[in-house]
Image: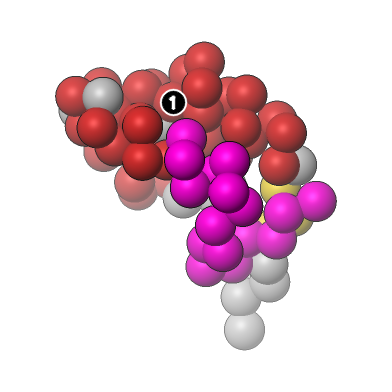
């Protein structure tokens, strides 16, 4: 069983807004694979970055992530 990763919501949101196009928000949540993809595509040319900002801002329930 995979343990949920406790992630500070404010930190993830700020990192997503500032460094989201580099995938930093995904690395914080423990999602290294998608973090690398986001890094090499510059946040999906901005589209993926915007979607992640909205999802994190609304505290979307990511698999194995618990917002604190």
Q: Nearer the viewer, residue 9 or 39?
A: 9
Query: In what element is the residue under mark 1?
Result: helix
Residue 39 visible in image: no
Residue 29 in percent (x, y) is at: 57, 47
Hey, which quadrant is residue 6 in on the image?
Answer: bottom right
Boundaries of the magenta span: 53-68
Q: Nearer the viewer, residue 63 or 48?
A: 48
Residue at 61% x, 32% y: name it.
13
Hey, which quadrant is residue 36 in on the image?
Answer: top left
Hey, which quadrant is residue 9 in on the image?
Answer: top right
The answer to if 47 sits in the magenta stretch is no
Position of residue 10 in the picture relative to residue 37 (left or right) = right
What residue is disc 1 on?
A: 20
Q: Residue furthest right?
A: 68
Residue 8 vertical position relative to residue 14 in the rendered view, above or below: below
Q: Nearer the viewer, residue 51 or 37?
A: 51
Residue at 61% x, 52% y: name it.
59
Position of residue 1 in the picture relative to residue 36 (left or right) = right
Residue 28 in percent (x, y) is at: 59, 39
Residue 46 visible in image: yes
Position of residue 18 in the picture relative to residue 66 (left or right) = left
- What is the count of numbered marks? 1
Q: Quadrant of the N terminus?
A: bottom right
The answer to if 61 sits in the magenta stretch is yes
């Amino acid at each position: 069983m995979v343990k949920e990763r406790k992630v500070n919501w404010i930190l993830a949101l700020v990192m997503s807004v500032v460094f989201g196009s580099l995938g930093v928000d995904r690395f914080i949540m423990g999602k290294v694979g998608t973090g690398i993809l986001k890094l090499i595509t510059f946040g999906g040319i901005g589209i993926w970055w915007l979607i992640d900002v909205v999802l994190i801002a609304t505290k979307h329930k990511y698999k194995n992530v618990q917002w604190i």
